[in-house]
Amino acid sequence: MTDAAQIDTTQLWVVIVGLGLGSFGLRFVFTGLIGDRTIPEWLLRHLRYTAVAVLPALVAPLVLWPAATGGTPDLARGAAACATVLAGLLLRNVLASIIAGAGTLWIVLWLTGGGGL
């Protein structure tokens, strides 16, 4: 590594400790401050959608700007995303959706001669 690629040790530890404190603080708000109180129904209703929103937020960049193609959208990943959503809507089964998406990705890559996942 060159000197330009390295970070100062003090600066690194400040970032690590800061991120750790921020992460602890976010969790403490729910467990420490309001953990023993009844959460209002309207807040519970909104919290139910957190997990549903996180997965698409993680997957969308992999479909729209895949690293395997240098950031260019391609047919295989788009088809796999569509197959996953369609299987999820029709079958209401997470495992079936995952299998449909993975199978579609592999089949379309094989048909189009795309090498990498």
Image: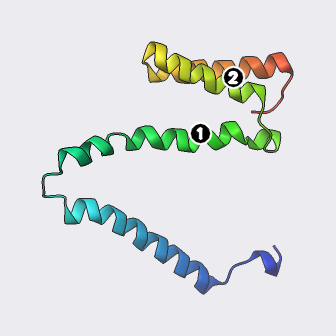
Residue 8: image location, x then y, percent: 66, 84
Q: Is residue 96 visible?
A: no
Residue carrying label 2: 79
Q: Residue at x 77, y 26 (%)?
A: 75
Report crowding for label 1: few under 14, some 14 to 19, many 20 or more residues within 10 A (C-alpha).
Answer: few
Which tag, 2 or 1, sits closer to the chain's start?
1
Report crowding for label 2: few under 14, some 14 to 19, many 20 or more residues within 10 A (C-alpha).
Answer: some
The quarter of the picture where the C terminus appears is top right
What mark, if any, has residue 89 been given in the picture? Answer: none
Toward the viewer: 64 or 93? 64
The secondary structure type at the circle numbered 2 is: helix
Q: Residue at x 83, y 29 (%)?
A: 115
The secondary structure type at the circle numbered 1 is: helix
Q: Residue at x 73, y 77 (%)?
A: 6
Residue 59: image location, x then y, percent: 59, 39
Quarter of the image for residue 74 reads top right
Residue carrying label 1: 59
Q: Is residue 90 visible?
A: yes
